[in-house]
Image (cartoon, rainbow, N blue to C red):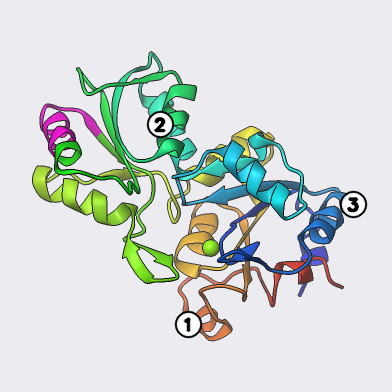
Amino acid sequence: MQIKHLDHIKALVLDMDGVLWREREPIGNLPVIFKSFSKAGLQVVLATNNGTRTPAQYVEKLAEYGVKIRPEQVITSSLGAAYLLQKRFPMGGHVFVIGEMGVETAMKDAGFAISEKDAVAVVAGMDRSISFGKLKTGCLCIRAGAAFYGTNPDRTFPTPEGLIPGAGSILAALEACTDVKPIIAGKPNSTLFEFAEQRLGIAADEMLVVGDRLDTDILGGYRAGCKTALVLTGISSFEDATRFEVKPDLIVPALENLLDD
Ligand SMILES: [Mg+2]
């Protein structure tokens, strides 16, 4: 049940954590795997719900594993949020950000200025230096009519110490003080895949979304109209897949098995 049965596929949209690496350990020989994809004529895009880093930082991280990619190949949930904001506010404007470098850079690159003054939107995500002051300003902006966007819904974030608060926990705090639900860019919503589709200039069903989580990667890819492949190197197991509402088009032990005969 491998990729040759999906021979109209032109691009792979890969999740990173649990697909390319676990903690700091690469999963398989990444340079060889990426070479096999380019040999097969497949474009590769990396799509992550983690919005704290910039594409340039992922380019560096991949380089440490011996894989050369271009920043345009990386789509984070912060870029997804910027993509949604650009569609809604084509003239730009001020946005108030609760988040790290990944969000700020994405907003500036999309033509928005970072300021709470007359903010058209509040964009929130994982922020490891969150303060009462930031929550208060975000709350007041939203209450004054600013649109409320979130990078990704993940309530927790895995670390060697255990699960710590993720973007979703910060969104929950803002929701609690405003009674407004955020518009979320990350998976399982389809925004990241629509953005990939636009960047690559191909149709949704020509993209194979590869991920380790059924409830984000596979569901999101399915909602966007893409083909989907589950790898068993991360969160979801084969048994989970048999019970899940959406069946992946492929299930493979690891990314290196994707092109196997
Ligand atoms: Mg993952």
Residue type for callout 1: Arg
Predominant secondary structure in magenta?
helix
Q: Position of residue 198 (x, y in %)?
A: 60, 34
Position of residue 199 relative to residue 39, above or below, is above
Question: Which residue lies under the disc numbered 1?
Answer: 243
Residue occupying the point 17% across, 51% down: 173
Does residue 19 appear in this view?
no
Residue type for callout 3: Lys
Label 3 vs label 1: CA separation? Answer: 35 Å
Question: Which residue lies under the disc numbered 2?
Answer: 104
Residue type for callout 2: Glu
Question: Which residue lies under the disc numbered 3?
Answer: 39
Q: Position of residue 219 (x, y in %)?
A: 48, 62
Label 1 vs label 2: CA separation? Answer: 39 Å
> Which image quadrant: the C terminus?
bottom right
**For residue 255, what is the image quadrant?**
bottom right
Front residue of 256 and 22: 22
| Mark 1 / mark 2, whichever is N-terminal | 2
**Would you say 216 lies left or right of 202 here?**
left
Secondary structure beneath label 2: helix
Bounds of the magenta segment: 136-147
Q: Position of residue 90 (x, y in %)?
A: 41, 18
Does residue 75 appear in this view?
yes
| Mark 3 / mark 1, whichever is N-terminal | 3
Residue occupying the point 11% across, 32% down: 140
Q: Position of residue 229 (x, y in %)?
A: 64, 66
Q: Between tags 3 and 2, which lies in front?
A: 2
